[in-house]
Image (tube, helix red, strand yellow):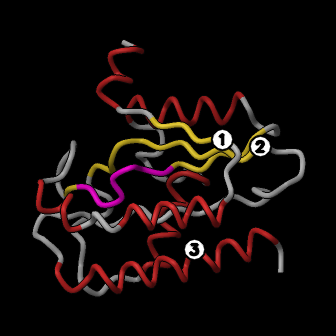
Amino acid sequence: MTAEETAKNKLLNCYADVIEKLKHEVPGGATNPLLVDIPDGYFGSQKTRVMIFGQETNDWHGEFKQEIDYSEFVKKYHRFFIDKKSKYSNSGIFMQFLNSLEEDIKGEASVVWNNVVKIGKAKGAGLPSANILEWQKNLNKFIEQEIEILKPERLAQFKLPLFLEAVS
């Protein structure tokens, strides 16, 4: 089994555990979780592993349901960010920045997009309500597990309102 396959299996197990804990008390208005995936060659010896954090998703494939197929959301991430096959893959200044950065460092680094707020609000942009943020507080350990599994060598975080001011 390759390092990428091992990491993907560990991520799926992590996601299964976390979703199981969260799914019993889903607050209204929460969107689906951002569950990351990695591209082929992520652990390549010539590449620097980079994880870049945005703030939150804007309606990530609808409202969070109690019965969720977490592996399907890993595939949605792959299609959106790695394959760039979604009509929204290059929408918004943050995703345009990430895509441009990826193009600029192609072959030198492998980028994973993540978010500080793993479960945003459904049907809208911006931070979710206080009750959704409180409900997902335990996801901080979830992010720590993603970092432990994916072993990025560089981490970066953008707070979008400040980021937008800086690039406007």
Helix, strand or loop under label 2 = strand
Q: Is residue 115 magenta?
A: yes
Where 59 falls versus 154 (above or below)?
Answer: below
Question: Where does the magenta region start and end?
Answer: 114-120
Query: x%, y% of residue 140?
Result: 39, 61
Estimate the spatial distance between the alpha carbons at disc 3 and disc 2, rounded to whole Å.
Answer: 20 Å
Q: Earlier in the sequence, mark 3 or mark 1?
A: 3
Helix, strand or loop under label 1 = strand
Q: Is residue 88 left or right of residue 45?
A: left
Report the residue marked by disc 1.
154
Front disc: 3 or 1: 1
- What amino acid is at disc 3? Leu
Where 145 falls versus 10 (above or below)?
Answer: above
Q: Residue at x 42, y 15 (%)?
A: 167
Task: Specify the quadrant of the image occupied by residue 29.
Answer: bottom left
Verify CB contact (< 8 Å) between mark 2 and mark 1. Answer: yes
Report the residue marked by disc 3.
11
